[in-house]
Structures are given as structure tokens and as C-alpha cells.
Image (cartoon, rainbow, N blue to C red):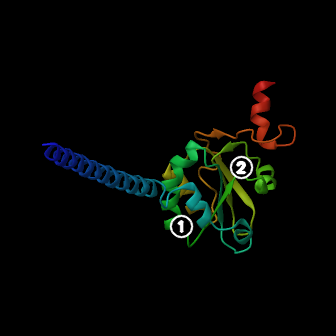
């Protein structure tokens, strides 16, 4: 009788172990599937219209100033919501005008671009500088711009005409004070507010 009970108990325990293995396998499979879905979801969100991706594909400023083509320079930051909002539209404009216009992107959080930030008096982003084919800045716009405004300005830039929306100002993101306020010109807006 005890043997029968022992075999029953062993059989019962074996069923529990098998059930746990199946449950654990299902959980592991679901976790892997969820991880893959999240990974590909992020890849879709941060595809070719991400600021980082566009910056990598942009024309280096040194090249743009010497290649004889007009240039659209964008001062941006990864945290700038206005910059993020315009990224898909600018990607489309670059696709349309990339053969005729240099598209340069300079991240204001990179101290390497401090001389350009000072030269073009960047105090809000996105900040766009339209540069003619001789390397001379001819107009600037600040803040979110509708695609039609950007396109009209690019057409005028290519055609050597006065830009129709040269003094355009849209929604901006203030530059964050990421460095010493006494030495960083990007901190101007925060100093002015606190003073």
C-alpha cells in the first residue's frame, strides 16, 4: 500500500514539475516576444526622422561653407520639443532639396558649436540660419515653422531672392543653462529672467 502511495506521490510530483516547466516556457516565450516587439517599436519611432539620425546625415558645416551651395543651418537640441516636432517635415524638405541645398545641424548642447552659437546669436531653438552660396548668412528664423514657410524660404534661397519669411518667429524652446552662467552665452535668457 505504501508503495502504491509512493508511486502516486511521485507521479503527482512529476505532473507538477512538468506543469511548471510548461508554464515557465510560456512565460519565457511571452517575455521574448514582448522584448522583440518593444525593440522594433522603438526602432520604428526613432527611424529616419529622429534628430540624431538627421544630424548624422547632415552636411558638415566645414563642407557646406566651401561647396558653393546655399545652406540651411539648424541649431537644435535632442530635448527640444519644437525641434522634434519639425524633424519629419525637415526630413521631407531635405529629401526634396538635398541636391540644391546643404542641410547642416548643430546641437547647441555640444560646446564645439559655441562659436557658431555666438556668431548667429542663438538664444532659442530651433534656430535656422539661411546662408547663401558664398557662405554669407542672409536670413534667420526662430521657432517652429510650417513646412510651407520653410519651403518658400528654401526656394528663394536657391533662386537668390529675398526670403519671404526671413523674420519669422514660431514656438521655441529656450536654451537650457547646462554650463557656468558666467561663461556660457546660452544662459542669457535664464539670467535675464532671474535679474
Please identify the quadrant where the N terminus is shown.
top left
Q: CA distance from mark 2 to mark 1?
A: 27 Å
| Mark found first going from the N terminus, 2 or 1 | 1
- 23 to the left or right of 87: left
Tally the numbered discs.
Answer: 2
Which is nearer the eye, 177 or 58?
177
Query: Which residue carries the number 1 mark?
Result: 97
Residue at image point 75% right, 38% down: 177
Which is nearer the eye, 176 or 18?
18
Q: Nearer the viewer, mark 2 or mark 1?
A: 2
- Label at residue 109: 2
- Label at residue 129: none
Q: Position of residue 176 (x, y in %)?
A: 70, 39
- 81 to the left or right of 5: right
Mark 2 and mark 1 in contact? Answer it, CB < 8 Å: no
Which is nearer the eye, 121 or 168?
121
- Element under disc 2: loop
Residue at image point 77% right, 42% down: 186
Amino acid at each position: 500500500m505504501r508503495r502504491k502511495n509512493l508511486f502516486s506521490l511521485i507521479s503527482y510530483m512529476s505532473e507538477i514539475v512538468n506543469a511548471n516547466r510548461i508554464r515557465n516556457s510560456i512565460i519565457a516565450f511571452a517575455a521574448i516576444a514582448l522584448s522583440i516587439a518593444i525593440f522594433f517599436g522603438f526602432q520604428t519611432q526613432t527611424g529616419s526622422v529622429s534628430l540624431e539620425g538627421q544630424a548624422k546625415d547632415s552636411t558638415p558645416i566645414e563642407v557646406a561653407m566651401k561647396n558653393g551651395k546655399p545652406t540651411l543651418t539648424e541649431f537644435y537640441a535632442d530635448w527640444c520639443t519644437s525641434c522634434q516636432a519639425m524633424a519629419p517635415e525637415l526630413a521631407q524638405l531635405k529629401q526634396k532639396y538635398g541636391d540644391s541645398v546643404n542641410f547642416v545641424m548643430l546641437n547647441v548642447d555640444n560646446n564645439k558649436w559655441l562659436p557658431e552659437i555666438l556668431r548667429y546669436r542663438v538664444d532659442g531653438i530651433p534656430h535656422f540660419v539661411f546662408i547663401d552660396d558664398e557662405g554669407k548668412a542672409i536670413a534667420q528664423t526662430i521657432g517652429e515653422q510650417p513646412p510651407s514657410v520653410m519651403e518658400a524660404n528654401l526656394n528663394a534661397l536657391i533662386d537668390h531672392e529675398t526670403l519671404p519669411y526671413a523674420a519669422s518667429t514660431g514656438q521655441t524652446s529656450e536654451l537650457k543653462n547646462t554650463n557656468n552662467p558666467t561663461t556660457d552665452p546660452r544662459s542669457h535668457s535664464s539670467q535675464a529672467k532671474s535679474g
